[in-house]
Image (tube, rainbow, N blue to C red):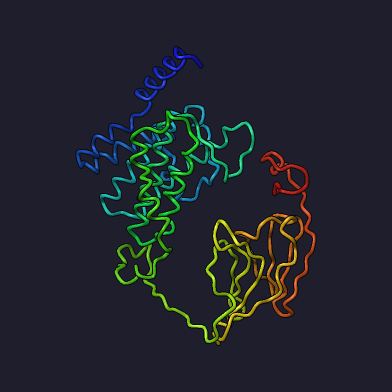
Amino acid sequence: MDDDEVAEESVIRSFLAQKYLTHREGDHLFLAKRFTAAKEAYLREAHKIVGASFTLPAMSGGKYGLHCDVYVKLNENPFELANLQGCCLGMAKCLLQENDIELALAWCEEISSLHRCTYYRSQYPLHDWRNWTLDVPEMTFLKSAGLCLASDIFASLGNSATAATRRWVANSTTVSLTAEHHTPALKSLLDMGLMIKLLESRHPDPQATLTGRVTVPALQARGSWTRLHIKNAGGFTEGRQNFSSFIWRSCLYITGGRKSERGPYYRDIWTLDLNKLDAWRQLPDYPVPAPTTGLFLGWNMVLYNNVALLFTGRPTIDVFDLETETWSSFHATYNPTSADTAAGVLHSWPYPG
């Protein structure tokens, strides 16, 4: 694309932004602290886009699901979609000013829902862990603003883990975008220093319980921490992340995971009797080698009767018998439906790799 084409595209973007981004009327009212009038303006503009009978926010009612046909159709006009995101962000900010925390979070989530529906614009099916966005900088900013606002709200509630996650997603999903998306406003919003501070925190931080207060009973529960002292030291003593865990017959089980991103990586399994708290006891290691399964990170073990089923994404399901403390496995089968095939499932198994 030469300089003339870039200039022409910039003019087109500017024209479309002025035509469609009518949520800015609500923004002016918000800045004037006229929150009721601002909400009326945002809702009026939003319903012009989705229709008067459409329930907003859609996610909170659970009526439309993650694949919302109304939102998917908006992919035909990305600036109209961005306008709706702007209305959602404005509603969230107004509700936060009115201390309606729960509904403010619902409107923040609506922005993410709109973004997820852009995935259906792709020519090929996309897994939800793949980053994808339309080339509209305004949408990038609004999606990030919704995530950062939600992060701030969760932090105020003492939910530091979700606060860190929201801000991490806002940062990580914009890194590979072109320079046009990285506006000064976006860079200021993302605040790398704040993200690092959140990531360095413990989730939750035991010290936070000393000063934490329940301010939104509908979203918070008063809890407390108690340190469990093991009678006999040794065994499972190092901290680890990305492990699987479950409780069976008052015994805690920890398996797999890693010490850090640099390793070491684990394929062991340990148990602790929570009634006795006598000592960690090591059980037989997971016997399937890493070249076959990949690293034992973030897998789920599901209790069924007296066994723990381990799902690795392979057709083979590994089984740990909790009574005999032995490993076994069985082979699962799968027949894709026409809907699975249309969604991008290839061959006879839903998980790639």
Q: Left or right: 328 with respect to 160?
A: right
Residue drawn at the location 28% of the way across and 45% of the way down: 94
Q: Which of 152 and 26 is in front in this view?
A: 152
Q: Which residue does the image show at 52% across and 83% down from the upper left? A: 230
Residue 7 horizontal/vertical position (percent): 41, 15
Above or below residue 248? Residue 137 is: above
Viewer-nearest residue: 70 or 183: 183
Find residue 88 and report its image quarter: top left
Image quadrant of residue 247? bottom right
**Residue 328 occupies quadrant:** bottom right
**How many marks on residues?**
0
Q: Where is residue 269 in the image (x, y as percent from the top left)?
A: 65, 72
**Above or below, 174 relative to 224:** above
341, 223: nearer the viewer: 223
Residue located 34% across and 67% down the image: 208
Is residue 335 in view from this perspective? yes
State the residue lying farthest toward the top. Answer: 4
Question: Residue 158 location in percent, x, y?
Answer: 36, 62
Answer yes or no: is residue 251 visible: no
Closer to the camera in the image, 245 or 175: 175
315 up-or-down from 229: above or below: above
**175 displayed left or right of 316:** left
Residue 1 placed where, x, y %?
51, 17
